[in-house]
Image: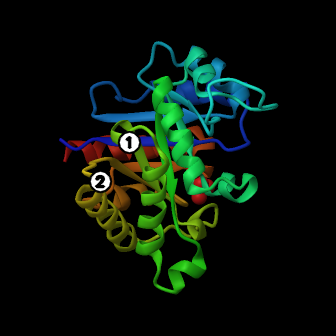
Amino acid sequence: MRKYFIAGNWKMNGSVDLLNKMHNALSELPVQGSNVTAGVFTPFIFVQHAAEIFKASPIVVGAQDCHWMSSGAFTGEISPTMLIEIGATHVILGHSEIRRDQGDSDSRIGEKAAAALNAGLTPIICVGESLAERNSDSTIRIVTQQLDEIIKASTKPLTNSVLAYEPIWAIGTGLAATPDQVQEVHSAIKEHLFDNHNLQLLVLYGGSVTAANAGEIFACPSVDGALVGGASLKPTEFSGIVLSAISAAQR
Ligand code: 13P
């Protein structure tokens, strides 16, 4: 039976009311024992509340970033140990919006991954190419280069991590990569990780995933789930994606 991971990245959206609605919607689903892990990744301010709401459920809770140190003079920052203390189990790292807005480099992402793993969090590490990079046929080179840099900078093996392939041009555009494009990159990533780093990780796809296209994406042999943005803010839509993974896991 294949394993799938569905992560909802709320970005800077949501509310306590949405958490309650999401909890109600997800509790209707047969997630327990399904080989599917589903999680909500809220803004920092809601993580503790989310952890309390989902405490008795199989749904995991995470944040969208963390610092590379466990404490210190870093005004405005949140450390991985703090996230653990309030009940998070996962953290998204290296999202293209954080690379763009906060200047995170691959080596910084590697440092954050090591800190997260040391604290006991499972990082979901994002890589992906821009439209210009795809149009110049550099996708595989860019993505494997990002992975190599991240792995080099992490003082901890990334064995207990998850990866997410998120082509920047597919994020929030309604223009998801085609199943063929996704499969090509995912299989290249897996081959590269296994051959060069002896790593076998789940690789999620992110970029305009909806309940309508999730099925064809999950049918790709090298796709292990999705990192969902916009659709993770709509309880019915997100539930549809999780259900689609549950049926894909049964095949
Ligand atoms: P969308 O699903 O809104 O395209 O966002 C994808 C994403 O960035 C998830 O991290």
User: Compared to 244, does 99 lie above or below?
Assistant: below
The disc at residue 61 is none
Q: Is mark 1 within 8 Å of ligand 1?
A: no
Residue 182 lies in what quarter of the image? bottom left
Task: Please name whichever residue, 48 or 69, is drawn nearer the observer in this view of the structure.
Answer: 69
In the picture as drawn, the residue positioned furthest to the right comes out as 75
State the residue at coordinates (50%, 40%): 113
Mark 2 is on which residue type?
A: His
State the residue at coordinates (48%, 58%): 149
How would you rate the neighbour count of disc 1 (Cα within 10 Å): few for under 14, some for 14-19, many for 20 or more?
many
- To which residue does mark 2 refer? 197
SS at badge 2: helix
Q: Position of residue 153 (x, y in %)?
A: 49, 49
Does the CB distance between marks 1 and 2 fall below 8 Å?
yes
Residue 236 seen: no
SS at badge 1: helix
